Image: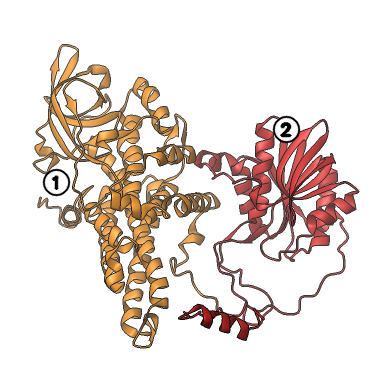
Amino acid sequence: MQALNPMDLYDIRSELSDEEQMVQDTVGRFVDEKVLPNIGEWFEDGYFPRELIPEFAELGLLGSSLEGYDCAGLNSVSYGLICQELERGDSGLRSFVSVQSSLCMFPIYAYGSEEQKEKWLPPMARGEKIGCFGLTEPHGGSDPSNMKTTAKKKGDDWVINGAKMWITNGSIADVAIVWAMTEDGVQGFLVEKGMKGFDAPEIKHKMSLRASITSSLYFDNVVVPEANRLPKVKGLKGPLSCLTQARYGITWGGIGAAQACLRELLDYTADRKLFGRPLTQTQTTQLRLAEMSRQITLGQLMSLRLGRIKDAGKLHPSQVSLAKWNNIRMAMDVARDARDLLGGAGITVEHCPIRHMLNLESVITYEGTETVHQLIIGRELTGEMAF
Amino acid sequence: MKILVPIKRTIDYNIKAKVTRDGSGVVTDGVKMSINPFDEIALEEAIRIKERGEAEEIIAVSIGVSGAQQQLRTALAMGADRAILVETEEATQPLHAARILLKIREEEGTDLVLMGKQAIDDDANQTGQMLAALWGRPQATFTSKLTFEDGWLKATREVDAGLETIAVELPAVVTTDLRLNEPRFVKMPDIMKAKRKPLDQRKLEELGVEAPAKLEVGTHEPPPERKGGHKVESVDELVAELKERGVLS
């Protein structure tokens, strides 16, 4: 009987097509060579490695699931594997790709005019133009229907006022997909860098996602031409459909973060001797490693199934909520316990668990908090909306 | 110019190989397989030659199990134009591989065979040289730099004394060393395009290549485990210990 792969006890790999395996191998190698040697330092320095953007683009990771417009046209499982491998590196880098691909390029692709698509998608795929997504507001993120940012029609233009908060990529973005309340309900606008009255300062002093840029967006009578309104969607289903795309990728990302922690722990506990024997020879250590493996395996099964449902065009947003809730809670639990098992060594960025643990505090909060996802499942089961 | 690039499917270089219990070989079941890294360097070089406009076509060829299709697909995604799999369940030894490659080269009429100097599984470092001999054409082995001029190639080789540059008349065999180039990452759109590139599957029996006598492998054993070192207090102690081990006299 041969030994199983500790990162893949149920041999999920054998469920992947040759193309999907190739995607995983390529991005995995990229992360091993370009991200892992430096990420501890980037995180500690609060540095987002912009120099990687052209490399992400060269690999075809930006907007990878879109067809045409210089995009790769990969399936959903491949996109998930990209997220998993990137987040095995760091949640901040995965966040960059999620936002660019699922929250910015996707809405332009799905709801934009042909002119908007031609103008933005190819340079965004090439990493020459960066996007950010403005939905959450300073007064709260879980209640987007209570949106205070407004867009008022004035002649052929729109005038936007308000503020957005916790916006990944905000300060480096060339275009912000901004959702604002209009007389016709919520609509999306492409607000471009340099438009008068638009400001995007970076939020400093973060203890999480330190290798990623997070910003506030302020709109003070920003005049946006009608040509910059996303014409094909009205109402909250616009932004929510983008979130479904991004959240789906995040379910895979959590697996990557958890695998990175378990991998590091397996090496550490085999070498670390306490009371005259390696930690791996003690039952408490084994129980905790086994629990991590159980959780990771469950998460892998959920994401793979979710990906296959999505590729079959039958995805229900509540199914994404279940997996986002499960997999990010799982990753958080794994990272925290891994941090603990490392003892004192676990408090420095020399070992990855504390970095993943801190990052995951953001991941469990953004793109729908854990509680919101639980209540979405509650609503699905009972038919009653409790939030 | 047409370039033939032989690709061997080997255990991924990141995997710590394990010897099977009976010592008959190493465990490959369920182990991640990749393109032999030296072959990947050869393919990268072929792609660069083609990008410079000095070659028209790159044909990747592998000899091995049906699973080697995956490595050929990767080669196609990197930039090979088409691929040939010579299918066999048996492990192929260098002389046999050289005869098969000679046959494929004849069929394809390629002027250059660009291949890894060795495969990281058996480390034989023989196939390229044997192919050149059977073909009756010159070879440039351990190449770390490669240029072309007027039907000749110039290869810089890594030899014990340093670097040696030789000129070789085409057609020829070139085997690649580690420092020739750094292979590119496969791009996502090219993974999709690779699906549509031709991959020709042939049975080894149908090639009509005579199999040479086989080397018989006795047994495999893992290298002895490294013992941890220890710190010494002084230079005198260090010298004494080195003498004790016969390193110093």
**Quadrant for the N terminus of chain B in the image:** top right
Q: Which mark is residue A142?
A: 1
Element type where label 2 sits in the image: loop
Q: Is residue B44 left or right of residue A302?
A: right
Colour of chain B in the rendered structure image: red
The answer as to whether the residues below labels 1 and 2 share one chain is: no
Q: Chain letter of disc 1?
A: A
Name the residue beneath numbered marker 2.
Answer: B56
**Other-residue count near label 2 (Cα within 10 Å), few / some / many at <14 / 14–19 / ≥20:** few
Q: Position of residue A204 (x, y in %)?
A: 19, 44
In the image shown, does B5 or B230 lie closer to the viewer? B230
Q: Chain letter of disc 2?
A: B
Q: Residue at x 37, y 48 (%)?
A: A310
Q: Is residue A52 left or right of residue B3?
A: left
Q: Residue at x 53, y 49 (%)?
A: A19
Residue A306 appears in view: no
How is the model colour-coded?
A: by chain
Element type where label 1 sits in the image: loop
